[in-house]
Image: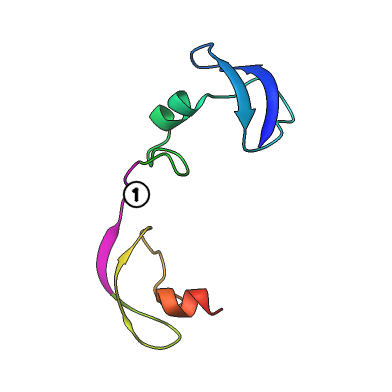
Amino acid sequence: MHQGNWSCSGCGNAITELPFEPNRTDGLLCKDCFSKKSPTGGAGGGGEKKMFEGDWKCGTCGAAITKLPFQPRETGNLKCLDCFKNK
């Protein structure tokens, strides 16, 4: 974590710690403003990630894939969680 003395561009509150060192200070958002702006609640923000249900097959092992955190455009290169972790 990087310590500093920045201001949130959304609400003006003080930001004293960020998970990255900012190159610029304009456009910085505090955790609350970031969570409100992000559709998933931000990384680790506790928001529910939208899951897409379908009837797909893993392109490596052929296992069934029923849920994905994205809507696939092509299905030939999908990987099940086990194959994705082992790549």
Please check the rendered image and state whether residue 1 is part of the magenta-colored stretch, yes or no.
no
- Residue positioned 37% across, 41% down in the render: 46
- From this viewpoint, is residue 79 visible? no
| SS at mark 1 in the image | loop
Please check the rendered image and state whether residue 54 is part of the magenta-colored stretch, yes or no.
yes
Question: Quadrant location of residue 64?
Answer: bottom left
Q: Which of 77 and 22 is in front in this view?
A: 22
Rendered position, 74 above or below 40:
below
Relative side of 8 to 33, left or right: right
Q: Give the range drawn in magenta.
A: 47-55
Q: What residue type is labelled 1?
A: Lys
- Residue positioned 41% across, 88% down in the render: 61
Rendered position, 9 above or below 68:
above
State which quarter of the image contains the N terminus: top right
Question: Residue 28, image x and y in percent?
Answer: 60, 24
Question: Quadrant location of residue 76?
Answer: bottom left
Q: Which of 17 and 83 is in front in this view?
A: 17
